Image (spheres, helix red, strand yellow):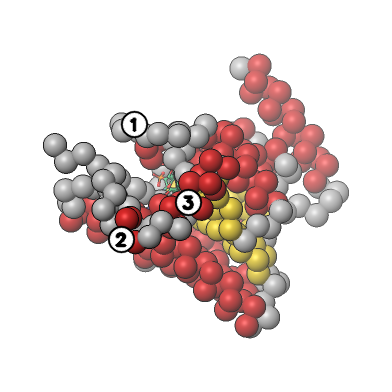
């Protein structure tokens, strides 16, 4: 309760201040839980106007209640064909968008290769991702530019046996962002890009299984926002995972193919 009151006072102070300074507007897709929700709260604290979207509107409303003056919500399912339209409506309601942050994603270990899990992951992380990031790119291309950030994963830096579609779709996301950055430069568009690649973070995505080197979600979100504010092109969260990925990327493929990352019995 006390925390809520302090937060509301801080929020009112920021709102008052930012009325007289140009207010930056961010849209975060996938802000109903985990990293997206934490990133939204940090950006609010930094004075941003924030548009938050996901499928669970009630969870988004909880975030909105912390600072109703500067939060706009929308129910958007990235797997739905009309999702880009919903995104443009949200940007319209906010009076514009300078930052598009794509956080939405699903992921499961799938060592039995259940076909539904593989297909759902591709639909959300590849197809849904492409339609949303593409819509954001076209919006920024015609509205004076801005910043596109995405959360991919270190899982995209190598093919991981325990989660084939997750690993492959995260590689897709990183490659897609790299391609869009080259495209924006070729077209001389003032759009910058950030590809955030976290290691294992303690969020609902990983609930139910045990993972090594688990990162605290709040700490990871703060590092992500720092990378965002300094316009990093690619950022791996955190330093331990920077060392790990540095090593495994140099591992010969003949060794990588034989690594046993799952116990089969
Ligand atoms: N946790 C980790 O260890 C880790 C590591 C590397 C990368 N990541 C990536 O970080 C991102 C955030 O995940 P998290 O760890 O914070 O997990 P999370 O708490 O499960 O958050 C996932 C978010 O994605 C949204 N989402 C899922 N499907 C959606 C859809 N069809 N349409 C719109 N929104 C959808 C969820 O909202 P609704 O369910 O309300 O729609 C939720 O807000 C994901 O892209 C994940 O792959 C996580």
User: How far is disc 3 from disc 2 in space, using C-alphas?
Assistant: 15 Å
Q: Secondary structure beneath disc 3?
A: helix
Q: Earlier in the sequence, mark 3 or mark 2?
A: 3
Q: Around disc 3, counting alpha carbons within 10 Å, would you say few (fewer than 14), some (14 to 19), or many (20 or more)?
A: few
Residue under the image location 41 percent in, 56 percent down: 251
Q: Is residue 178 visible?
A: yes
Q: Secondary structure beneath disc 2?
A: helix
Question: Furthest residue to the bottom?
Answer: 187
Residue under the image location 60 percent in, 46 percent down: 224
Q: Is residue 100 visible?
A: no
Q: How many marks?
A: 3
- The reply to whether the C-beta atoms of the residues labelled 1 and 2 are less than 8 Å apart is no
**On the picture, is 191 further left or further right than 172?**
right
Question: What residue is pinned by disc 1?
Answer: 210
Question: What residue is pinned by disc 2?
Answer: 254
Image quarter of the C terminus: top left
CB at disc 2 and ligand 1 closer than 8 Å:
no
The one nearer the camera, 104 or 60, is: 104
Q: Around disc 1, counting alpha carbons within 10 Å, would you say few (fewer than 14), some (14 to 19), or many (20 or more)?
A: few
Q: Earlier in the sequence, mark 1 or mark 2?
A: 1
**On the picture, is 250 further left or further right than 225?**
left
Please determine whether, in this image, residue 211 is positioned above or below residue 102.
above
Report x, y in % for residue 234.
58, 58
Report x, y in % for residue 35.
51, 41
Q: Earlier in the sequence, mark 3 or mark 1?
A: 1
User: How far is disc 3 from disc 1 in space, using C-alphas?
Assistant: 23 Å
**On the picture, is 108 further left or further right than 242?**
left
The one nearer the camera, 122 or 162, is: 162
Image quarter of the N terminus: top right
Report x, y in % for residue 82.
40, 65
Question: Furthest residue to the left?
Answer: 265
Question: What residue is pinned by disc 3?
Answer: 247
């Amino acid at each position: 309760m006390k925390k809520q009151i302090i937060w509301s006072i801080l929020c009112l102070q920021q709102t008052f201040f930012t009325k007289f300074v140009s207010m930056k507007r961010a849209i975060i897709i996938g802000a109903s839980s985990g990293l997206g929700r934490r990133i939204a709260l940090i950006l609010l604290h930094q004075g941003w106007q924030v548009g938050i979207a996901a499928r669970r509107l009630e969870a988004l409303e909880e975030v909105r209640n912390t600072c109703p003056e500067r939060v706009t919500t929308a129910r958007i399912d990235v797997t739905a064909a009309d999702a880009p339209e919903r995104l443009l409506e949200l940007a319209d309601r906010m009076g514009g968008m300078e930052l598009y942050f794509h956080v939405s994603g699903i992921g499961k270990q799938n060592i039995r290769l259940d076909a539904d899990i593989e297909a759902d992951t591709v639909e959300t992380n590849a197809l849904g991702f492409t339609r949303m990031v593409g819509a954001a790119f076209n919006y920024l291309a015609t509205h004076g530019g801005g910043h596109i950030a995405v959360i991919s994963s270190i899982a995209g830096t190598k093919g991981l046996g325990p989660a084939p579609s997750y690993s492959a779709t995260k590689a897709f996301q990183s490659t897609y962002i790299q391609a869009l950055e080259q495209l924006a430069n070729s077209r001389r568009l003032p759009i910058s890009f950030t590809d955030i690649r976290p290691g294992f973070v303690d969020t609902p995505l990983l609930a139910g299984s045990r993972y090594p080197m688990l990162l605290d979600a709040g700490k990871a979100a703060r590092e992500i926002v720092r990378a965002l504010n300094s316009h990093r092109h690619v950022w791996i969260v955190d330093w331990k995972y920077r060392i790990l990925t540095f090593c495994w990327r140099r591992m010969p493929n003949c060794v990588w193919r034989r690594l046993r990352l799952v116990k089969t019995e």
